[in-house]
Image (cartoon, rainbow, N blue to C red):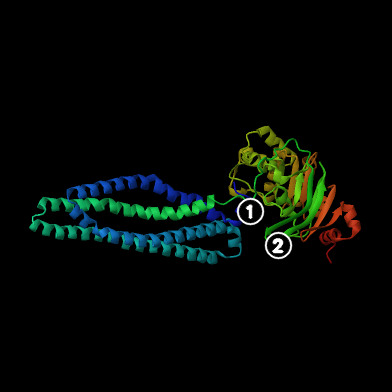
Amino acid sequence: RQDLAFFDKNPVGRLMTRVINDIETLNELFGSGVVALLGDLLTLLGVAAAMLALDWRLALISFATFPFMLRATAAYRRRARDNYRDSRRILARMNAYLQESISGMATVQAFGQEVRHFKKFQEINTQHRDVLLKSIQYNAVFFPSIELFSAISVGLVLWAGGGMILDGRVLPGVVVAFVQYVHRLFAPIRDLAEKYNILQAAMASSERVFKLLDVQESLVEPALPTHPVPLRGEIEFRDVWLSYTAGEPILKEISFRVAPGEKVALVGATGAGKTSIISALCRFYDVERGSIRIDGIDVREWDKRSLRRQMGLVLQDVFLFSGDIARNISLGDAAISGERIAEAAQRVHAHDFIERLPGGFQAVVEERGSTLSQGERQLLSFARALAFDRPILILDEATSSVDTATELLIQDALKTLLLGRTALIIAHRLSTIQFVDRIIVLHKGRIREEGTHQELLAYGGLYSRLYELQYQPLA
């Protein structure tokens, strides 16, 4: 439900803590605590009513410790709640750091940073341990205090009851009964104290869970969203400004049009705004000013999911899911048949390496495709885009991480893949985009040049300099 911006700002480990650890704490409360809580409350009320019916004077004496017990409970609640909040916050930090360190383990080991990362994790873990020890200390004070109040109540009953026996106001059996009643009265109170501990943990977790659930989507769906009819594939940017941080625009005055079936490349130095154009087109982020139109309709008027289903996306950093090869191409879409998967792999020259794998299309893919080379992962992403057969194709540095031989295979596959489709292609290797209809050159978030490969070389501007830097002979 949340937008991509939300996941960009929140570490994975922190989110996992909220949806797993915090939910488990709430489950513990509702799974066992609530049922026992109702039973304890009924027992407490029943015993108190029996004591009042037997002798209201001794009953009130028995209840004399309750105000002090309530004050102790209030003090415990304040400290325990804050402590549990700290515990959940530090646990989220620890999980986020652990997830990040494990994901980047190759870099950590390559640069010999194991000791530093271990010490950092140990520091966070020590903070978590200290918070838990503080919780144990609070419990070690609070729970014995309940026993102390129970003993004081028994003592008060014996002291007051003894005097009343001597005065002949009550029978000895009544006092004996009250001693038993006091023990019965404090039994559910002890149990409630233990459940109160669970309740404090659950309250701290619920605050975090509800805070997560209350986050509003930054991309507002229109009241009457447009659902796509067969697209022509026309794309138009009209004076688009985009900012990730207020006051720091990434895109400025971006205006261009891509005709249906046209192939347009976006080039420029790192940070020029190429990927931001793609993010805005897919409506991962809303533009600050201006508009982006597909087939003449503002993307903010489209149903987001339906809009994105019209686009095939091939990224530089290919993400593969745990499962098999076929499922990674189809993403589990039942509408994509095995024959269609095989055909897509064949057309992008991925079929040969897939057949060499044990199990072929049923070969197991490890997390993030760690057992496959970068080139093989890239070929699978091409097969995925072709299998989904979208009218608009977006390639983001799709050939930047492959070897020359694989790049030649992909270039051949692209000619088939791009037929009849509108395409936006981001590339650093300028040799891979010479076949496109038009090239847009970006610099610091603005369009600086526009034209064909030959026109831009003849112009002698920024594109020409980029081309010379890549292909001029080394001195």
Viewer-nearest residue: 296 or 7? 296
Q: Quadrant of the C terminus?
A: bottom right
Image location (x, y in percent) of residue 222: 67, 44
Q: Quadrant of residue 97?
A: bottom right
Q: Is residue 434 visible?
A: no
Viewer-nearest residue: 262 or 371? 262
Q: In the current view of this chain or complex, which residue is farthest to the right?
A: 458
- Residue 248 disc label: 2
Image location (x, y in percent) of residue 389: 72, 38
Question: Which label's residue is closer to the chain start, 2 or 1?
Answer: 1
- Residue 5 disc label: 1
Which of the two marks, 2 or 1, is nearer to us in this view?
2
Helix, strand or loop for disc 1? helix
Viewer-nearest residue: 429 or 265? 265
Q: Is residue 18 above or below residue 248?
A: above
The amino acid marked with disc number 2 is Glu
What residue lies at 37% left-to-right and 46% top-to-bottom?
A: 34
The amino acid marked with disc number 1 is Ala
Helix, strand or loop for disc 2? strand
Q: Is residue 45 visible?
A: yes
